Image (cartoon, coloured by chain):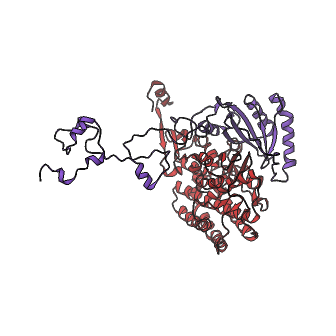
Chain colours: A red, B purple
Amino acid sequence: MATDQTSEARLYTEGPEGLRSEEMILNMGPQHPSTHGVLRLVLTLEGETVVHCTPVIGYLHRGIEKILENRPYMGGIRYMDNSDYLSPMLNETAYAGAVEQLMGIEPPRRAQYIRLLCNELQRIASHLVAIGTYGLDLGAFTPILYTFRDREGIMDMFEALGGSRFNVNYLRVGGVLHDFPAGWLQQCEQWLDRFERMGLPELEELITGNEIFDARTQGVGYIDPRQAVAYGLTGPILRASGVSFDLRVDRPYMAYREIPVNVQTRQEGDAFARYRVRMNEMYESVRLCRVVLDKLPGGAISSRTPIALRPPRGETYFALESSKGEQGIYLISDGSEYPYRAKIRGPSFVNLQILPELLRGYKMADVVAILGSIDVVLGEVDR
Amino acid sequence: MDLAPRLGTPAEQPSLLAFDRAHLAELVDDLSQRLPEIVGHPVPIQRMGGGAVGIEVPAESLPDVARFLRDGLGFDMLTSVSGVDMLDHVDSIYHLRALGRNWLLQIRVKLPADKPEVPSLVGLWSSANWLEREEFDLVGITYTGHPDLRRIMLDDEFQGHPLLKSFRSTPTVVHDPATTQVPPDQAIAGEQQRRVERVVGKRLGQGQEERLHPGTPTFGNMAIFQQTGQGVEPDETVSRPGEMGTGS
């Protein structure tokens, strides 16, 4: 901290009764359990009230955009897993969809339905982590055990599909890697049944009616709808402020053109509304998964694409609704096997920007309650 | 570099949504009527994949165009800002959304490669703050008028901008030879690596001869230290048991 005259004068302010109060600068993170990764917040506190907050990011920067430029199109799919490591399937779909849009190819219907099923399962898994860790931030230890138990079922299914729990590497340009292994659909159906019968009601019982949870979240971290749009927020945060914007409905891609989605919105705009939107989206995702299991068409799982993909020269922007918001890929091809430029528009990165605005004037204890309700993944913030 | 197709006729971008044509005609009409007034010359408007519309404006008229887009046409969300090194120039690319009318617009601003400067849009959309900082960090575009233009992903002391095509991915750092580290531009592993690595065993007191106490046992190496000031190769100084002893 600087010790020259001006900053001394700034730090000590004379109160009304001659009491001197001092602003304190507190470093939260980068190694802090409640920052959901390596996020560092430089908080300026006056007593217990947050006056100013400066997020410092970049501790997890791996240069994924540069890596993608140095990999063939198919090879880049695997690196998209590491961007938002809690929803790899959605990232892969975004990248594969961008390449397909650039090449002008359409995956077969069965592949689109498989993608939708994987995307919705991944959305449930991501929301489960968001809600479980949010409970942990607020001092409730039990919910995370239940959510991770349920999420484990999804991870097992992904392992059976792609061979890996996190870096699934399951999508391909023009389709998916494998068809379902034997018994996978029954396993999925059983999981959905169990989740709807046990998992979701248990979460509702544990969290929704909880007095402490209500007191910590209701009216905390209010975001005005206009402010939310100006800050480019997307996903559950935007919908919790009453703006009905969901790319699955507004710009339907792949199988969402055939399967309509009920957009979940809330009007309150506080942390509790964000939690509620995530819960409702899980119900909606379960419904969508059942629709896919019902209507799953036959046929090929992948269109015939050349081994060496050479999209025509040009550019495209493809965006889909990830679990945290709009996951966009801006892709430029120069006609070679490598992308000329692949820009990842991550929802977490854009959503985190509003944090200083939200924290101003709240107490120190509300910092984690607000940060957790934004649900950022630092792998994608830093890329 | 340009993105014009090299062979044959330009391929027609497939419209993925049927309602796009009528839906976007309105936007294209509005843009083609108003943009030449603001910019001062005709503006190229093109339809792109995924139902987006692309325009290209010069850097000096970007704030006016952006203000018209936000207040006149209802583009209320700045979704992403991308910087692209096109070798002979640098592009700053903006993606805007109009939530009310479900439009997606791409603005391309061409900037000179030696001095890429473009007016900042933070005053119009708050989301431009970090998005522009990121491109400043990784591509090196200066957004004039930005309130807090610092590096965001990389260290403040970092040299260069990684997403430029001229950036060397492997660091040009001269390594101290007395380490086990392999130069990072040699992609080798396993047995090969072991041969390249130059392992210099550190012996007692190496490099700090003047601080050695006269009574410290150095097993006969003290003279070599004092002559050369360097460590000696491991092979020459492996002391075999027979030759070791002063006593037995």
B182 sits left or right of B243 in the view? right
Residue at 54% across, 51% down: A36
Q: In which quarter of the image is the N terminus of chain A?
A: top left
Residue extending furthest top?
A5
Residue at 67% across, 32% down: B120
Q: Position of residue B52 (x, y in %)?
A: 78, 46
Q: Where is residue B119 in the image (x, y as percent from the top left)?
A: 69, 30
Name above or below for residue A374 compared with residue A181. Answer: above
Name above or below for residue B241 compared with residue A285. Answer: above
Q: Nearer the viewer, residue A184 or A340?
A: A340
The answer, for residue A279, to whether it is visible in the render is: no
Q: Where is residue A327 in the image (x, y as percent from the top left)?
A: 67, 50
A291 sits left or right of A132 in the view? right
Q: Nearer the viewer, residue B164 or B55?
A: B164
Task: Locate residue A197: give its quadrant.
Answer: bottom right
Q: Nearer the viewer, residue A291 or B29?
A: B29
Q: Where is residue A278 in the image (x, y as percent from the top left)?
A: 65, 57
A169 sits left or right of A284 in the view? left
